[in-house]
Amino acid sequence: MLDPDFIENVGAIEAAYAVLNEIKVNDPVSTSKAVDASKVFVVGSALNAWYGQEVTLKIADATEAKTPEGYKTGVALDISLFADDVALKDLTMPVVISMPIPAGVETKDLVILHYHGDATEPTVITPVVEDGYMTFSVSGFSTFIVTNIEAKAPTTADNSVTVVCAMMLVAAAVVVFRKKSAR
């Protein structure tokens, strides 16, 4: 779904829809220390508005969010889309957001955890990562945590499998060596 040609086509449709319906699309606004609003791009926000409304994507630091176990410490953000002064929680049409990866978050194993509404378990979003930006699609807004999957150390069972495989390779090498020596 994050094909650049598709996003460009949706952007063109959105622009025409906004003109036809007199919808004003404001530049994104950020009060977050982690996100520079001038580097955030949004496609699809006007498609969630009605005639004559203004839409604005707003980003703030999330103070209550905690990164769950299995993930590195992340950057928590409250991302909202407003039509006039009303926050749109569930969207009619998905919105594509592209923004710089926050400082302290690596590109390897990057995920976005989305806590929508009263959910206690997040939806895991795997963004497209390119040139220091992450691009992702959402159909609702609330709290997001930009983080990395934490690398797991091999368990004892994993080590046992490795040892067994190594022993099998040694045994096979011994059999081959003995057959060659017997000739």
Image (spheres, helix red, strand yellow):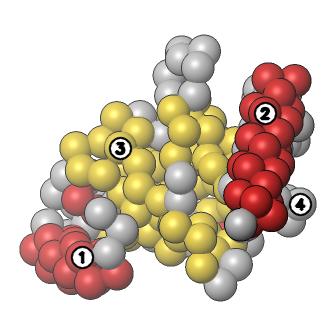
Find disc 3 in the rendering and name its residue: 139
Distance between the Cα atoms at labels 4 and 3? 26 Å
Residue type (three-letter) at the residue carrying disc 4:
Gly
- Which tag is nearer the camera, tag 2 or tag 4? 2
Q: Residue at x 83, y 28 (%)?
A: 160
Residue type at mark 2?
Answer: Val
Tell me which label, 3 or 2, sits earlier in the chain: 3
**Quadrant of the snapshot with the N terminus:** bottom left
Marks 3/1: CA distance? Answer: 17 Å
At 14% from the left and 71% from the top, the residue drawn is 17
Q: Which residue is mark 2?
A: 164
Q: Is residue 106 above or below residue 78?
A: below
Dot 1 or dot 4: first in sequence order is 1
Q: Secondary structure at mark 3?
A: strand
Q: Position of residue 56 (x, y in %)?
A: 47, 59
Crowdedness of circle 2 by 10 Å Cα count: few (<14), some, many (20+)? few
The image shows residue 83, relative to residue 134, as above or below, that is above
Pair 4/3: label in front: 4
Quadrant where the C terminus is found in the figure: bottom right
Which label was assigned to residue 104?
4
Place residue 101 in its image quadrant.
Answer: bottom right
| Residue located beneath label 1 in the image | 6
Distance CA(mark 1)–CA(mark 4): 31 Å
